[in-house]
C-alpha cells in the first residue's frame, strides 16, 4: 500500500482534544485553538473598523516579482511558481499585501472612500527550510490600510497588532521599530553601505554576497553570526533619513509613547520585502528561538503606484498564526472556543431510532447541538459515545415512554434524571443552556 504523508513543511490542524503522546506541533495545532485565534483576530479587527478581504491563493507571478522585489529571498528562492495549462506563470501567494493591492486596483475600491481598512486570514506559501516556527505553508492574520499617510495610522496598525496578540493571552511581547526611509533618502545610504560592505565581502555568507549585488540593505537583516559581526558598524538608514521621513518617524514614536506603548528602536530592522518605506516594525516573542517574529509590517507608500495605480500610501502587517499558537503553548496559555453543550439521543429498537431521527431533526433546526447513534449500537456503547463526546445531556428514547409522549432526560454532570414530556424538551434545554452561559 502507498503511504501518503503531508508535504514537508506543512501541518494538519486536527479536531478533538490533544493527545500528550503526539509531537508538539500536532498537539498544538488543534481546530479549537485555531478557531479561537481567528475569532479574536476578527473581533479586534471589527472593533477597529477593518473589513475582511479574501483574495485567490495564486496570482500572476509578475505581481510578486515586481512588488516583493527580485532581489529578495522570497522571490529569488522561495516561491511556488508553476505554469498553468494555458502557459501562464502563476505563483502560490508568498505574502498577502500585493494581492490586496491588486484587488484594490482591479475593483477600483479607491473610488469609494479615502481610507480603506482591510483584514485577511489565510495560507501563505514559501519554500523555506523547515525549522521550529517556520513552514512551507504557514498562515497569516494580516491588515492593510490604503490611502492614509498620517503617522496616527502607523500607530493604529501597531496598536491593533498588539491588541490582537495580548487578547490571545500572550505576554512577553517586544515591539521593535525602525524607519527605512524612502526613495529620497535611500540612495545616499546605499552608496555608503556598498562602500562599507565592499571591503568585507570575504567575510559575508554566500547569500549576503548575492544580497550585496542585488539589494545591499538586506545584508543588515542576515541572521548569520559572522555577517552580523562584520556589519556591526555598517551605516544604518536611521542616520540618513530625509526631513519628511525623520518628522514622520518622530511623530510615530511620540504618539506610541503617548499611548503608553513600549518599543525598542532597532536600526537593523529592514524587513524581507522590497516594498517598505518609512516605518517598519516587528513584534517578537522570546520563546521561539530563531523564528521569534510573531508579527511584521510597515509602510509601503510606493506599492500601489508600482502596481499601476495612482500614488496611494499604505501600511499593514502580517502575523503568523502558527507562531502565535507555539508562543501561547510556551506560556502555558489555553485558547479555546467555548463548545456549545450537546444533547445525545439514545435509541435501540427500530421504532426508537426513527423517533430519534425526527427529534434530532427538530432540535437541530431549533439551534440545538444533537448527536444520535447511526450504527445500531447497544445502549451501553451509545452511553460510552455520549461520554466521549462530552454530551451535557442524554435523552433516553424508549418505546413505552414514547407512546405517552415522554422520555427520560439525564444531566451528565450530576447524573440526575427526570422524565419529561417531549414537547417540553426544547424549552428545558434552552433554559439549561442559558444557565450555563451565565
Ligand atoms: P513577513 O514578515 O514576511 O511579512 O511575514 C509576516 C509574518 O508571517 C512573520 O512575522 C511571521 O510571523 C509569519 N511568517 C513568515 N514566514 C513564515 C514561515 N515560513 N513560517 C511561519 N510563519 C511565517 C509579510 O508577509 C508582509 N506581507 C506583512 C505586511 C503586511 N506588511 C505590510 N502589510
Image (cartoon, rainbow, N blue to C red):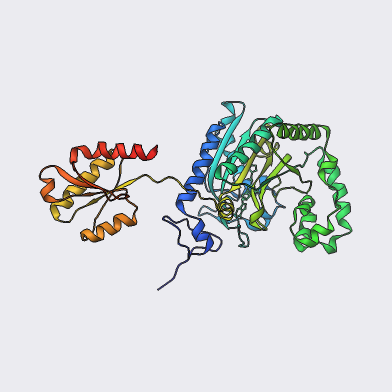
> In the displayed structure, would residue 430 be above or below residue 12?
above
Viewer-proximal residue among 143 and 355: 355
Q: In this view, does 252 lie to the left or right of 163?
A: right
Q: In which quarter of the image is the C terminus?
A: top left
The location of residue 415, given as percent across then percent down, is: 28, 51
Number of numbered markers: 0
Taking the image as drawn, is residue 36 in sight? yes
Quadrant assignment, res 152: top right
Q: Is residue 239 left or right of residue 414?
A: right
Furthest toward the bottom, the residue is 1
The location of residue 367, given as percent across then percent down, is: 31, 39
The residue located at (72%, 52%) in the rendering is: 71
Q: In this view, does 191 lie to the left or right of 17?
A: right
The location of residue 160, given as percent across then percent down, is: 61, 37
Viewer-proximal residue among 56 and 3: 3
The residue located at (44%, 56%) in the rendering is: 14
Q: In which quarter of the image is the N terminus?
A: bottom left
Q: In this view, does 69 lie to the left or right of 398?
A: right
The location of residue 168, given as percent across then percent down, is: 55, 44
Quadrant assignment, res 16: bottom left
The residue located at (55%, 36%) in the rendering is: 45
Taking the image as drawn, is residue 89 in sight? no
> In the displayed structure, would residue 184 be above or below residue 351?
above
Viewer-proximal residue among 12 and 286: 286
Amino acid at each position: 500500500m502507498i503511504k501518503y504523508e503531508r508535504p514537508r513543511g506543512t501541518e494538519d490542524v486536527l479536531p478533538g482534544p490533544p493527545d500528550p503522546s503526539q509531537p508538539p506541533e500536532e498537539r498544538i495545532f488543534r481546530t479549537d485553538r485555531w478557531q479561537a485565534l481567528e475569532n479574536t483576530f476578527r473581533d479586534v479587527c471589527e472593533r477597529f473598523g477593518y473589513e475582511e478581504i479574501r483574495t485567490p491563493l495564486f496570482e500572476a507571478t509578475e505581481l510578486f516579482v515586481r512588488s516583493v522585489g527580485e532581489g529578495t529571498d522570497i522571490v529569488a528562492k522561495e516561491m511556488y511558481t508553476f505554469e498553468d495549462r494555458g502557459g501562464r506563470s502563476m505563483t502560490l501567494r508568498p505574502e498577502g499585501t500585493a494581492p490586496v493591492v491588486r484587488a484594490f486596483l482591479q475593483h477600483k475600491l479607491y473610488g469609494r472612500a479615502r481610507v480603506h481598512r482591510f483584514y485577511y486570514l489565510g495560507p501563505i506559501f514559501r519554500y523555506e527550510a523547515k525549522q521550529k516556527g517556520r513552514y512551507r505553508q504557514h498562515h497569516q492574520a494580516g491588515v492593510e490600510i490604503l490611502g492614509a499617510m498620517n503617522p496616527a495610522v502607523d500607530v493604529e496598525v501597531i496598536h491593533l497588532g498588539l491588541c490582537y496578540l495580548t487578547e490571545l493571552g500572550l505576554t512577553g511581547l517586544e515591539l521593535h521599530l525602525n524607519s527605512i526611509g524612502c526613495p529620497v533618502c535611500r540612495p545616499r545610504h546605499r552608496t555608503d553601505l556598498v562602500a562599507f560592505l565592499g571591503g568585507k565581502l570575504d567575510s559575508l555568507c554566500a547569500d549576503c554576497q548575492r544580497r550585496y549585488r542585488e539589494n545591499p540593505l538586506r545584508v543588515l537583516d542576515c541572521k548569520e553570526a559572522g555577517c552580523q559581526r562584520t556589519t556591526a558598524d555598517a551605516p544604518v538608514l536611521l542616520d540618513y533619513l530625509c526631513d519628511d521621513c525623520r518628522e514622520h518617524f518622530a511623530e510615530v514614536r511620540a504618539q506610541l509613547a503617548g499611548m503608553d506603548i513600549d518599543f525598542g528602536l532597532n536600526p537593523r530592522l529592514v524587513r524581507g520585502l522590497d516594498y517598505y518605506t518609512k516605518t517598519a516594525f516587528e513584534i517578537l516573542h522570546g520563546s521561539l528561538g530563531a523564528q521569534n517574529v510573531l508579527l511584521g509590517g510597515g509602510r509601503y507608500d510606493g506599492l500601489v503606484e508600482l502596481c499601476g495605480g495612482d500614488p496611494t500610501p499604505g501600511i499593514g502587517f502580517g502575523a503568523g498564526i502558527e507562531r502565535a499558537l507555539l508562543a501561547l503553548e510556551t506560556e502555558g496559555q489555553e485558547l479555546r472556543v467555548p463548545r456549545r453543550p450537546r444533547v445525545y439521543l439514545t435509541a435501540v429498537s427500530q421504532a426508537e431510532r426513527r423517533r430519534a431521527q425526527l427529534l434530532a431533526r427538530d432540535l437541530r433546526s431549533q439551534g440545538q447541538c444533537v448527536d444520535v447513534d447511526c450504527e445500531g449500537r447497544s445502549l451501553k456503547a451509545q452511553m460510552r459515545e455520549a461520554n466521549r463526546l462530552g454530551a451535557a445531556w442524554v435523552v433516553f428514547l424508549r418505546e413505552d415512554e414514547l407512546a405517552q409522549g415522554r422520555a427520560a432526560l439525564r444531566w451528565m454532570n450530576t447524573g440526575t434524571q427526570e422524565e419529561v414530556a417531549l414537547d417540553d424538551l426544547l424549552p428545558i434545554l434552552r433554559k439549561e443552556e442559558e444557565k450555563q452561559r451565565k
